[in-house]
Each structure stands twice: as C-alpha cells, then as structure tokens.
Amino acid sequence: MSRYDDDDTIVNANAYYASLRRKRGVKRIIQYPTPIMYNPTPAARASINTSTHLWVYGDRFYKLADTYYGDARYWWVIAWYNGRPTEVDVAPGDVLEIPVSIEDALNILGV
C-alpha cells in the first residue's frame, strides 16, 4: 500500500515538457498530487500504543518498518511520526516511538 494509492494522477502531455519526455523516452509523464499530511496532535499521539526503539549504529527506517509492520515501504510512517525526515536526523542513542498498529498510525497522520 502506497501513500499515493487513493490519489488521482495527472497525465502530463504538455508541449512544454516535450524535450524532457524525449530525453526519457516516454510519451507522457504521470504526476501525483502532493498529499496533505498532518502532524499528530499530542492527544492523538497519546491515543495509540507505541513501542520504543533505541537507535543504534546500522539502524534504518526501512528495516524498522519491516520488523514492526512486515513491510519496509512504511519506513516513512516511523520517520514522520518521530519528526525525523531522514536517518541523518537520528543519532545513535536516540529513542524513537514506533506506533504498534500501522492502521492507527495512518489514521492519526491523516492518510
């Protein structure tokens, strides 16, 4: 399940992008609208169960998502929930909160 599954796509065949399409060898470019996402409120965060994880050298968001959710594609939920957009923003010894239920996390995040 992708965060773009429920969004409409835009097929861009505009003449302005003709050189780009030629360069890529495609006739059209499919674009996705920017999803509107919300940061969870403190009350929403308190309403779901989380597990804590101590970040260690070698950890990756996609590995945590695979461990906790069985699907590495949900790495962005853990990153977003903790306000750490990339792994560079996490240092060894930092504690992350990982929502136990992916469905609850997606509801709180507005997805």
Image (cartoon, rainbow, N blue to C red):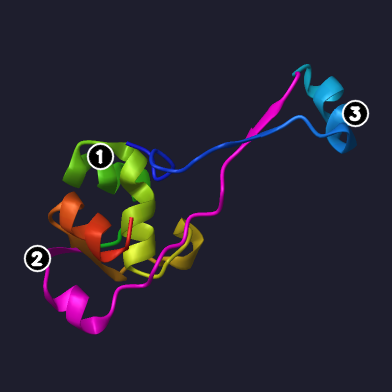
Q: What label sits on residue 66 in the rendered view?
A: 1
User: In the rendered image, is residue 57 in sight?
Assistant: no
Q: Nearer the viewer, mark 1 or mark 2?
A: 2
- Mark 1 belongs to which amino acid? Asp
Q: Quadrant of the C terminus?
A: bottom left
Upstream in the sequence, badge 1 or badge 3?
3
Q: Is residue 88 above or below residue 2?
A: below
Element under disc 2: loop
Marks 1 and 2 sit apart, C-alpha to C-alpha, by: 18 Å
Marks 3 and 2 sit apart, C-alpha to C-alpha, by: 50 Å
Q: Is residue 95 left or right of residue 36?
A: left
> Residue 23 at x, y = what percent?
85, 23
Q: Nearer the viewer, mark 1 or mark 3?
A: 3
Name the residue beneath numbered marker 2: 49
Marks 1 and 3 sit apart, C-alpha to C-alpha, by: 39 Å
Q: Is residue 76 above or below residue 39?
A: above
| Mark 1 surroundings within 10 Å by alpha-carbon count, few (fewer than 14), some (14 through 19), many (20 or more) | some
